[in-house]
Amino acid sequence: MASIHPTAVVDPQAQLGDTVSVGPYTVIGPHVRIDEGTTVGPHCVIEGHTTIGRDNRIFQFASLGGSPQDKKYASEPTQLVIGDRNTIREFSTFNVGTAQDEGITRLGHDNWMMAYTHLAHDCQVGNNTIFANNAHIAGHVHVGDWVILGGFTCVHQFVKIGAHAMTSMATALGQDLPPFVMAQGNMAEARGINLEGLRRRGFSPERLKAVKEMHRALYRQDLTLEEAKGRIAELAGSHPEAQQDVDLMINFLQASTRGIVR
């Protein structure tokens, strides 16, 4: 049986794994499922059609699965889906999706979500990301794997952030941020590549060299975006080990709809 504090209010229809722990004064609604090994701290509210995976740590005062902050929302049974091994710190707020998108807000696996982070409706967040304190992403934002958002970063609706990208403190991001790129400012400007992060993740010197050349094509050679795409596509021939990194960048640039941070 799940370990539920006597003061917690857990709807009888909620599905909790046998090793789930629920702290004092927490409220869990009828359409919530929480898998094995997850701990929920005191004074949390988990509502809506919310699914939470295994071995997550949810700290006090988190609000998960609430209605989206969208005037068009009409109580449709949209969802919040959270993966495994995430840390969700105090006062974080994650909303369910809307019928205007696919209806699901997603957080993947192994993410580190610090205090007061906000995932708005229909956001799609990958794996191994870090959201520092008060990092907020608006509706329909897509965040790739290994992204780091600095404290007080604010991201506009429909923005895409590529894998391994990073923002500094108090960055306002209104356009798409390509993979590997570091951005800073209000509004955000590209400042370099996330070199130290890539080294820590085991990128070889050959792959790092290709990433640097992609950055030069985008930001240092006075090329149009189409010209930069062509230059980047050619890198796979001279840096075969970096084929996956080149593909990641090209696919991101082709999918960008808001224009990229330049």
Image (tube, helix red, strand yellow):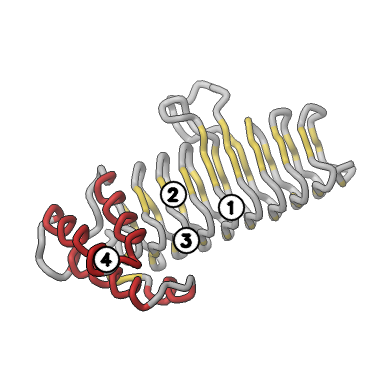
Per the model, the C-alpha gap separating discs 4 and 1 is: 27 Å
Q: Is 16 displayed left or right of 71 in the figure? A: right
Label 2: how many Cα within 10 Å (few below 14, some 14–19, many 20+): many
Picture residue at 42% right of the left edge, 44% below the top: 138
Residue 25 appears anywhere in the view: yes
Disc 1 + disc 3, Cβ < 8 Å: no
Is disc 2 in contact with disc 4, using a CB cutoff of under 8 Å?
A: no
Q: Quadrant of residue 87?
A: bottom right
Q: Amino acid at mark 2?
A: Ile
Q: Nearer the viewer, mark 3 or mark 4?
A: 3
Q: Nearer the viewer, residue 2 or 95?
A: 2
Q: Nearer the viewer, mark 4 or mark 1?
A: 1
Q: Residue at x 23, y 64 (%)?
A: 237
- Residue linked to disc 1: 109
Residue holding disc 3: 146
Residue sitting at 34 percent across and 47 percent down?
159
Where is residue 118 drawn, in percent x and y? 51, 49
Tag 4 residue: 190
Q: Give the mark nearer the N terminus: 4 vs 1.
A: 1
Q: CA distance from mark 2 to mark 3?
A: 16 Å
Residue at mark 2: 137
